[in-house]
Image: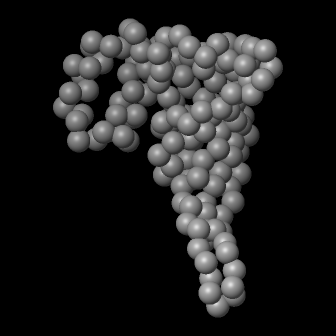
């Protein structure tokens, strides 16, 4: 879970209605132990995919450092990565949407929280929030 929390973007992969894969990096924030949120416009390819099939895969890298080790004459990479699977759903409850957006703003723009309430009042109704609930524990790998 630490990898997902530290990664600035998490790749969310889903399936298009025609069965082809679709993945994109999104700014996710963790809600509770098994929940992530992201926000988006009220229409678009992400939502079309999720309506057709709500199952998603998450992948993230929080550290990536290529290195040449001269003593071994070896090329390597040090990393921390994680993958997880979950089920996505659109959040309809206004208080949950507001809390998810608050978490996103606190993670990515904490220095501007004094503007949060005004922004929510202006845009909550036209902002879509998607909740991803993990369906199995995440798996991580690393080479420290």
The picture places residue 103, in percent across and down from the top left corner, at: 39, 34
Q: Please state the total of marks drawn on the protein image.
A: 0
Colouring rule applied to residues? one colour
Q: Is residue 108 visible?
A: yes
Residue 75 lies, with reference to residue 36, above or below; the image says below
Residue at 48 percent of width and 21 percent of height: 40
Q: Is residue 113 left or right of residue 16?
A: left
Q: Residue furthest right?
A: 19
| Residue occupying image coordinates x 49% and y 11% | 42
Percent of width and height locating residue 77: 63, 68
Q: Residue at the spot x=47%, y=24% of the render?
A: 39
Up-down relation of residue 34 to residue 75 (above or below): above
Q: Would you say 7 lies left or right of 52 here?
A: left
Q: Please name the residue shown 68% across and 46% down the image.
A: 83
Name which quarter of the figure residue 116 lies in. Answer: top left
Direction bottom: furthest residue? 71
Compared to 25, does 101 lie above or below? above
Q: Is residue 36 above or below residue 73?
A: above
Residue extending farthest to the left is 114
Q: Measuring from the top left, give residue 119's x and y in whole percent.
A: 26, 20
Tell me the quarter of the picture where residue 126 sits.
top left
| Residue 34 in sight from this viewpoint | no
Quadrant of the rendering where the C terminus is positioned: bottom right
Q: Position of residue 92 (x, y in %)?
A: 50, 12
Q: Is residue 68 left or right of residue 125?
A: right
79 or 96, which lies in front?
79
């Amino acid at each position: 879970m630490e990898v997902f929390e530290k990664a600035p973007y998490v790749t969310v992969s889903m399936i298009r209605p025609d069965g082809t894969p679709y993945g994109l990096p999104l700014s996710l924030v963790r809600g509770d132990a098994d929940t992530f949120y992201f926000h988006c416009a009220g229409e678009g390819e992400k939502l079309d995919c999720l309506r057709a099939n709500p199952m998603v895969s998450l992948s993230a890298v929080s550290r990536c450092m290529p290195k040449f080790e001269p003593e071994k004459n070896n090329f390597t990479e040090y990393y921390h990565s994680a993958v997880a699977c979950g089920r996505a759903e659109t959040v309809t409850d206004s208080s949950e949407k507001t809390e998810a957006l608050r978490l996103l703003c606190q993670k990515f723009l904490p220095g501007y929280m004094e503007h949060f309430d005004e922004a929510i009042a202006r845009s909550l109704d036209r902002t879509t929030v998607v909740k991803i609930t993990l369906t199995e524990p995440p798996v991580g790998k690393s080479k420290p």
